[in-house]
Amino acid sequence: MTFLRSTLYNNIDASVRGYASTDAVSGLIDVVVEGGQVSFTPRDEDDVPPTPYFVAVYGPDGALEAIAGGSGGLEPDFPDEFTLQATAARGLQPFALPDIEGDERFLAAVDVFQPDGVGDLFTQMVVVSTASTNQVVATFLGIYAVISVVILGAGALGTRWLVTLTFRSLGQVEDTAMSIAAGDFSQRMTDIEPRTEVGRLKIAINTMLGRIDAAISQREATVRQMRRFIGDASHELRTPLVTVRGYAELYRMGAIPTGDDTAQAMDRIEKEAIRMGVLVEDLLALARLDERRDVDIAPVDLRPIARDAALDVRATSPRRTVTVIEALDAVLPGGERSADSPDTADAKKRSAPTTTAIARAGASLLRRRSRQNAQTAADPDADTLPIAVRRPQPVVSGDENRIRQVVANLLGNARRFTGDDSPIELRVGVDPVAATGWIEVIDHGEGVPDQLKDKIFQRFWRADTSRTRETGGTGLGLSIVASIVDALHGDVGVLDTPGGGATFRVSFPLAEQREPEEHLLIETQPLPRLERDAL
């Protein structure tokens, strides 16, 4: 509006200066010269068309002589006196002139003129009304005000709608938060727009809720498992305690008269005490494993563990055949050996390995290597040459004592579920794809039904509920196996043995095997036997 007002007033200033610099008097006022005197008489309004300006004439002495012009309406309040000196000072510079009511609604400009035949100078004052300009400015101001109000109202409504639409999702966030505060952790955010801040907030809240829900579910599952565990442990301990208490009461009451009966009662008490001790040891082992204490991780070779376990079983069950199988030498295309081919004829099987057998096998290996080297050197153009492949060894990262406990528990489970003369195999191998070394305990008993394979590693779970507590164990052996394997970052599973039975496989990550030193790769020959006579 300031720019419009300034532009319109500049136009009026130019108009006033233009009128003042022309002979505006002759068209509106008659100039009469008589006897050297000049008189000014305004013409009749009927003879003169309306003009956009007023004209006033001032004499040489500054007195007002005549007023003419205009188009009706308000008239300017002309000054009664305007001297030539004031005219010279003003020049053509417009100035404000009030109307008869005292408001400044006119612009005036002055200039001098000299009528014909007169030697004196006179002043003509031209006045232009600013009422139309002020009206235009006021009209535009009103229009702009109305438009501004409409725009502001529309902007306010649009802003309110946009803010409401934008923060409507925050209302959903608030409702969800209130539901969560009430205990309903299943609530989730919907209508997610990932490209907006609110959408990303919803994603973050859903992620947080998922983790909270999972943590709560895990806590509830842990609490349920703990309660079940405590109940099962109490139930397991109650039976031997009742037995011990019963025999003690019988002895106190004198119901065991003879020495043989007393010996039998003491034997039963001792067995139940041993059973309670085993159960307590198993519970302590599980408690230690649940604490996730630091485990001493070191490279462990699975082959000696399998051999020692086989010797232990043979010592306790002489009638049982225990075989150790190293599934490391299966043939692959190009002469390479597979790391996991238990059915190949090259798989090494041996029962109850001994130190003598190991030494004999080492000497045989040296002689066989010498013959192979000699044959290769004699026939360099053979069609198929043996490929020197460094086969991975079953050396895993783990705790040797814990791995031995795992194998012992699996063997104890196999012995418990099979006859005294049923064979057991221990297979050791490597899975190069998964970078794991594994050991299997294979029995030929009744096996494990498919619907029970996921449950047998639970605590106090017994696949055969008909077994007595004297022969059935505590139900914690496989649970300890699963806990130890999990602590060592391994895996345990059960498969069906071909022909019947169960195969338990435990696998552990392979240890980082360094390349052998260069001097260890040099082929050596056995030293020639020195004859006693040569000494």
Image: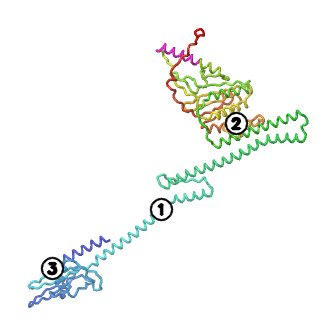
- Mark pair 3, 2: CA separation: 128 Å
Are the residues at dot 1 and dot 3 in contact (C-beta closer than 8 Å)? no
Question: Given the image, on which type of amino acid does mark 2 rest?
Answer: Gly
Magenta residues span: 364-380
Instruction: Give the side of residue 84 with respect to residue 473, left or right.
Output: left
| In front: label 1 or label 3 | 1
- Foreground mark, 3 or 2? 2
User: Which picture quadrant has residue 244?
Assistant: top right
Point out which mark residue 163 bears.
Answer: 1
Image coordinates of residue 47 in percent, x first then y, are 18, 84
Q: Which quadrant of the figure contains the N terminus?
A: bottom left
Q: Quadrant of residue 136?
A: bottom left
Provide the secondary structure element on which disc 2 rests.
helix
Mark 3 lies on residue: 23
Between discs 2 and 1, the one toward the N terminus: 1
Is residue 101 in the magenta section? Answer: no
Q: Quadrant of residue 38?
A: bottom left
* Type of amino acid at the residue the image marks with label 1: Val
Q: Residue furthest top?
A: 533
From the top left corner, tell me how far across and down residue 5 is, in percent. Answer: 29, 73
The Cα atoms of the two marked residues, 1 and 3, are separated by 67 Å
- Left or right, residue 462 beside residue 400: right
